[in-house]
Image (cartoon, rainbow, N blue to C red):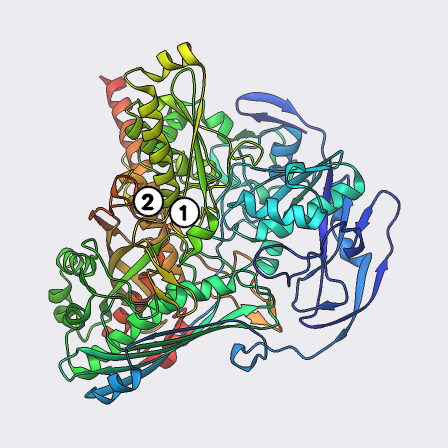
Amino acid sequence: MRFTLNGRARTVKSHPMKRLLDVLREDCGLTGTKEGCGEGECGACTVLIDGVAVDSCLVPAAHVEGLKVITIEGAAKTRLGKALQNAFVEHGGAQCGICTPGMILAAAPLKPGASLHEIKTALAGNLCRCTGYPAIFRSVEAALTRKKEVIRARAR
Amino acid sequence: MLYGATIRSTIPCGKITRRRIDLPAGFIVADHRDIPGKNYVALIEPDQPCLAEEHVRHVAEPVLLVAHHDKHGLIGIERHVTVDYAAATPNYDPEKSDLCFKRIAIDKGEIDRGLRNADVVIEGEYRTGHQEQLYIETNGVIAVPGDGQMTVYGSLQCPYYVHKALVVLLNLSPDKVRVIQTETGGGFGGKEEYPSMLACHAAILARKAGRPVKMIYDRVEDLIATTKRHPSIVRHRTGLTRDGKLMAVDIDVVMDGGAYATLSAVVLSRGVIHAAGPYRCDHVRIRGRAMMTHTPPNGAFRGFGAPQTQFAVEAHMDRIAEQLGIDPVRLREINALKPGDTTATGQHLGDDASALPVLREAVKRSHFTKKRRQLKGTNRGIGLSLFFHGSGFTGGGEVKLASKASLELTATGARILVASTEIGQGTRTMHAQIVADALGIPFDAVDVHEVDTEFVPDSGPTVASRTCMIVGKLLERCARDMKKRLGRQTPAQYFRAHGPFTVTAQYEPPPGLRWDDERYAGDAYGSYAWSCNVVELEVDPVTFEVTPINITAVAEIGKAIHPMMAIGQIEGGTAQGIGFALTEEVVMQDGRMANAQLTNYIIPTPLDAAPIDVAILERPYLHGPFGAKGVGEMPIDGPAPAVINALRHCGYDVRSIPATPERLLTARR
């Protein structure tokens, strides 16, 4: 099976029905993608497939043939990924941290200046038991503001 | 490395008649006969077997263990390893149980006199259900066998609990057992005692296989097999004067311990000590019992008995206010504990008793009085709760623990050595801040050693809102001792001249702290934190769905060492409390959790999150580090009664939680 993983072409030999989550963790050694429930409820295993946030525990490996997959390891290298990561640190968006990779990837497709309701909706499929969410909203808001400033700065 | 799986009982109660194992080569199977030491999970009572021998007391009780090199090879293993039983009749009602794990009696004054002198006596019964901790990372460990040794890595809160359990199970000397905490994806009490069981299982398999064994529960197994918050039944009989002064408080607390004792005795203890709420009364009688039922054992969960009993007292207070025609704020103002007052156990409160300040601040910030008037008769309601939470182990617990903390001088600063675990609450940061400030060095010059029993002393478990107030204080003492020894030199200068040294401090009770375990009287805790919640919510009159609109949480915690993280504790605990109040229902059918999935065990999601206005007040506790008290557990004590009191305000009489739409349907007045 061939797909693009964090910007690089990757070939993996695995059962076509193996969960993408297990392919990433076991075959690719990327353990930043977490398992919380295995049934698509908690979002800890969120990755981006062609830019869309998806629960990797519900995706059979065969499904991503030819597609672009971004995990938290890849997102950490992007400008927005870094902005989100820093904002989660600054605003206490991560406590135990297990939901954080999924939260960051679920927030990644948001546009600068997204409303609180849009943020909540984007994160609706991701559960956090530590923060009760307000600190996560503050983190995402801060990162998106920063993203907006970066874009504005570039426009000038 | 091998992967391990657990074969669990399928019935709630009965005798094992046969174990049938039909497996090809390559599988390792272990039962109780593979245990070289004692077959129980060492904690308080030696009653819970690590692997069942003849009898089972609950569904999902571990009976056999299987290991295999391919984790996928373990899927469906229970079809090849079966256990036959002669079933007996289970009992699920704690009040009909004939096995009591613990009874506690608190008496202050003369209850009969208090009731006699009261103008009115108001009674009520309140119930709470199981609640799942629901850390997002399920329980998991890896056991690595050595030559007469065992090392366990795991997602856990209390490395020395696991260490003790392994020493007893494996019959090894303490120096042959090593426990290392790995990054832990949440705990909330759910990884206080349960990891000892899982570590024992992995160690049994690892010992038999002679290879490392990894055991990680999937969500369903974690929900079915591991501990939950104790369900409770609390009955109040309260005598008052007509103008609302408490004259007599008579409380009966029943907790459902589940099948084995685990921590029920201590959960009950914290529950009964907090049962009278933050109120002054001369005549108090509290009776508590933790009973055995044929459900999986209940255990530690943030709050540890106090959320159950303070739900009852705070829901009761609003019923009293209503019956006496007194404003609920006024009723609390009349009776709230003040400096110089004594609690139900007779503890004299110091100047940091802050029930009134938190109440007044919360009422002001939330515009409670105005909204209470405006919302009357609408689908919106507003309610409040006043509560407190003792920091540290109960009674003589801290003295018995005799915790230690160490600080080692390094070439660039200092290194913290404690067994306190970081499970998301900020242990490492907060401890490093305390040491940096006490030592007068930059934060970055303080390291925190990994939690590994080979290197760190036993600082006691990471529970009971004690990590800052108790262990943080030990570290502050270490840092001050180290500073004395350094004199005018910086750590780097001293290290170059003299090399490293280590300072260790051991817990000593603050002067004058007294506790009588026989009479259950005296200073139950070194200090209390205080809080008031206000919840404004809306009920959909068609679906009976409840939506919290605004939440106010005012907390007096002595000193916020790291304000942002303290706010994080309050927001997170409050959200868990909202779940406890409204949606989190463990449905038990024939002793088995029927909704053991995140699809239908519903915790708050981002879309459910109401804004939480948090305010922190600081009235320093003399014996806390920089004045700090505990903060971790308290926030979960108050949201449920505030929600239920808001529901009462808009016309729903709820005495039992969670307040699901089904319950509200019949609670409309």
Q: Is residue B29 left or right of residue B134?
A: right
* Badge 2 vs badge 1, beta-carbon distance below 8 Å: yes
Callout 1 crowding tier (Cα within 10 Å): few <14, some 14–19, many ≥20: many
Indicate the amino acid at tag 2. Gly
What residue is shown at x 37% (from left), y 59% (from top)?
B577
The local secondary structure at tag 1 comes to loop
Location of residue A112 by image quarter: top left
Near-viewer residue (B529 or B651): B529
Report whether residue B384 is seen.
Answer: yes
The local secondary structure at tag 2 comes to helix
Quarter of the image for the C terminus of chain A: give it. top left
Indicate the amino acid at tag 1. Cys
- The image shows residue B535, relative to residue A150, as above or below, that is below
Count up the numbered dots: 2
Q: Is residue B459 left or right of residue B575?
A: right
Near-viewer residue (B468 or B438): B438
- The image shows residue B467, relative to residue B496, as above or below, that is below
Q: Is residue A61 left or right of residue B473?
A: right
Position in image of residue A144 (x %, y %): 30, 32
Give the letter of the chain under mark 1: A
Q: CA separation, marks 2 and 1?
A: 8 Å
Looking at this view, name the residue that lies furthest to the front. B512
Residue carrying label 1: A130
- Which dot marks residue B568? 2
Location of residue A27 by image quarter: top right
Report whether residue B139 is seen.
Answer: no
- Which dot marks residue A149? none
